Image (cartoon, rainbow, N blue to C red):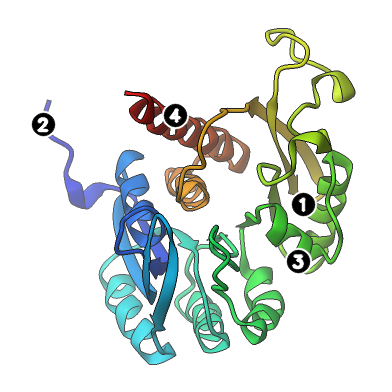
Amino acid sequence: MAAENYNDRHVALAIGGFDPSGGAGIIADIRTFVHFGCRPTAAITSLTFQNSQGVFGAIHETAESLRAQILPIVKEFRVDAVKVGMLPTAELVHEVARLIREEQLPAPVIDPVMQSSSGHRLMEEEAFEVFVTELLPLSRLVRPNHPEAEKLAGMNIVGEEEMQQAAARIRELGARAVLVKGGHLKPESGVRSQESEWGSSPTVREGVLKATDVLDDAGTVTTLRGEWIDGPSVRGTGCMLSSAIAACLAKRMSLLDSISAAKEFVAAEIQNSNSKLKT
């Protein structure tokens, strides 16, 4: 059988920050696109200075330089999916929303990156306000983690019921679909030990920790439960999840199937990372 023509692959575009250490951001997005068989393209919003220990600063692109990166891509390729990550300034949020509208790009999968895992702020407050009013309504899916969902929804999240409420509130802001991640919730909150409280899978012993996410797609709510993988935190899982969803959407998979495939991919990456740490 002839080798697949690289130019015939579905094209996925990542817009976000550059992590020189390769743990997150654009590099993680590109690795994920390639894993799912997509042709990766990318535009950088911010050159960050970071490693596994933290973020030490950044130099942000301008709207003009971001546009200059994206226009040649959309002129040459038909972009099948867009994943949006770090947008640190209001200027950049404006520009991404403008480019999506003007170039009729696919509705993006948005990872609303607001703060690094080490606590460094990655989105200015003014940018957040523009994000909510201009970019959120253009999304196919917005994928906040627990702290991001709390900020977007303006409420505290302590369990699955609040995750559903938060997803509904964020969707009311204009998002077509919202996937609220439960991984940042504390072990005692119930989301990591919900087997007895919310019912157990017949294939899992009662009491086993589960990772719970909530999807609200145009009002249809689905609770997604997977195995909780105990071990050290793995950098870039949010980037990988969002870009995996985008890659699957590029291949014309349904949103729910795309999320399921993406979760399996990230779980395997975490397992692989933990296995390497043990050797």
Q: Earlier in the sequence, mark 3 or mark 2?
A: 2
Circle nearer the N terminus (4, 3): 3
Residue highlighted by disc 1? 218
> Is tag 3's residue or tag 1's residue first in the polypeptide sequence?
3
Residue placed at 20% from the left, 52% from the top? 7
Number of residues whose C-alpha sits closer than 10 Å to that of mark 2, classed few (under 14), some (14–19) or many (20 or more): few
Q: How far apart are labels 4 and 1 at the CA level?
A: 29 Å
Residue type indicated by callout 2: Ala
The secondary structure type at the circle numbered 1 is: loop
| Label number found at residue 268 | 4
Q: Which residue corresponds to the image point at 54% horizontal and 39% vertical from the top-left?
A: 258
Where residue 185 appears, x then y in whole percent?
73, 44
Identify the residue under disc 2.
2
Q: Quadrant of residue 260?
A: top right
Q: Residues within 10 Å of mark 1 (few under 14, many from 20)?
A: few
The span from disc 3 to disc 1 (Cα, nearest Å) is: 17 Å
Horizontal side, residue 277 vs residue 185: left or right: left
Which callout, 4 or 1, points to the residue nearer the camera? 4
Mark 4–mark 2 contact, CB under 8 Å?
A: no
Of 232 and 163, nearer the camera is 232
Q: Which residue is mark 3?
A: 152
Measured along the vertical axis of the image, is residue 161 above or below residue 135? above
Q: Label 3: state its secondary structure.
A: helix
